[in-house]
Image: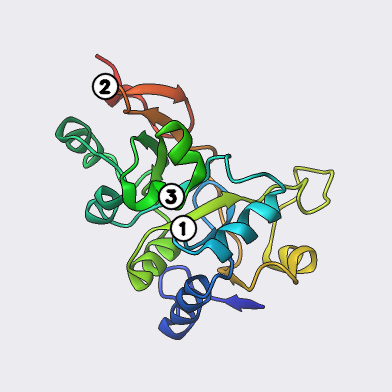
């Protein structure tokens, strides 16, 4: 099902429905600043199974955790003061940060339990942040790509109706704000050593991590 929403002011009833769907083990798709993503609750085995099945990978692959506040992020990741002081200057923004996981999340995510890492992202997407506020917890997500949709031309835009055609039996709700401008890949920063290490340079500036 597609719900057409206003990016800056989505209907609370729609956000309530999206939150209930993931609580019940369902999947919700929406665009972020980087690309379209599919989201589930990381605390739902049913939802996690669906999310990994849709990507056709086992649960040892890492997916990103979406957070709306440092309070929620610190419930799932060990964020030291040095990391916090840097991050608060640049989030929300197009970054993914890698930390050691808290037990609250590693007992659900096999990848985090295996290698003691968890990826955290504070997206600037207004729609996503409003949904996270409504859901009042973290979400786990994976990106949608043209290959998953059976599209060979990667220059073609991805839109809600195309996702519904491809995943009508898998994705329970699509939040579609209409035309959307994507910035590009997130910059990935690994904090597990205690100091920032840029793993991938994306659209997020790396100047703040340079000594």
- Determine whether 196 is above or below 119 in the image: above
Q: Residue, x 22% and y 54% (percent of image)?
A: 71
- Callout 3–callout 1 Cβ contact below 8 Å: yes
Please count the marks in the image: 3
Label 1 crowd (10 A; few <14 / some 14-19 / many >=20): many
Asked if marks 3 and 2 touch (Cβ < 8 Å), the reply is: no
Eye-nearest disc, 1 or 2? 1
Instruction: Work out how far the residue at label 1 is from the one at label 2, CA to CA, in angstroms.
Output: 27 Å
Task: Choose between 56 and 157: the one closer to the eye.
Answer: 56
Secondary structure type for disc 1: loop
Q: Give how far across and how far down residue 30 sits, in percent.
A: 56, 62
Say whether residue 37 is left or right of residue 13: right
Of the image marks 3 and 2, the number of the one nearer the N terminus:
3
**What residue occupies the far bottom of the structure in this picture?**
13
Camera sees residue 30: no
How many other residues sit within 10 Å of disc 2, few (<14), some (14-19) or many (≥20)?
few
Residue carrying label 2: 195
Q: What residue is rendered at 48% in x and 46% in y?
A: 64
How far from the left and from the top, in percent, is residue 141?
52, 53
The residue nearer to you, when weighing 16 against 48, is 48
The quadrant of the picture occupied by the C terminus is top left
Instruction: Say if residue 153 shows up in the picture.
Output: yes
Which colour scheme appears in the figure? Answer: rainbow
Task: Please tell me which of labels 3 and 1 falls first in the chain.
Answer: 1
* Label 3 vs label 1, nearer the camera: 1
Give the residue at mark 3: 65
- Residue 144: x percent and y percent? 65, 51
Q: Which mark, residue 42?
A: 1
Q: Quadrant of the N terminus?
A: bottom right
How far separated are the C-alphas under marks 3 and 1? 8 Å
- Which element type, helix, strand or loop, lies under badge 2? loop
């Amino acid at each position: 099902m597609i719900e057409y929403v206003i990016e800056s002011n989505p209907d609370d009833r729609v956000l309530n429905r999206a939150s209930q769907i993931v609580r019940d083990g369902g999947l919700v798709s929406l665009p972020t600043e980087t690309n379209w993503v599919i989201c589930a609750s990381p605390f739902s085995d049913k939802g996690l199974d669906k999310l990994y099945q849709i990507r056709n990978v086992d649960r040892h692959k890492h997916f990103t955790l979406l957070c709306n506040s440092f309070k929620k992020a610190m419930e799932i990741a060990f964020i030291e003061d040095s990391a916090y002081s840097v991050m608060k200057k640049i989030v929300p923004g197009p970054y993914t940060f890698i930390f050691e996981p808290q037990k609250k999340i590693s007992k659900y995510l096999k990848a985090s339990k295996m290698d003691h890492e968890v990826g955290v992202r504070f997206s600037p997407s207004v729609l996503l942040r409003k949904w996270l506020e409504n859901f009042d917890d973290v979400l786990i997500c994976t990106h949608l790509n043209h290959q998953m949709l059976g599209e060979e031309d990667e220059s073609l835009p991805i839109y809600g109706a195309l996702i519904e055609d491809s995943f009508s039996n898998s994705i329970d709700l699509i939040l579609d704000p209409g035309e959307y401008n994507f910035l590009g890949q997130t910059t990935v920063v690994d904090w597990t050593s205690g100091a920032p290490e840029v793993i991938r340079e994306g659209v997020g500036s790396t100047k703040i991590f340079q000594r």
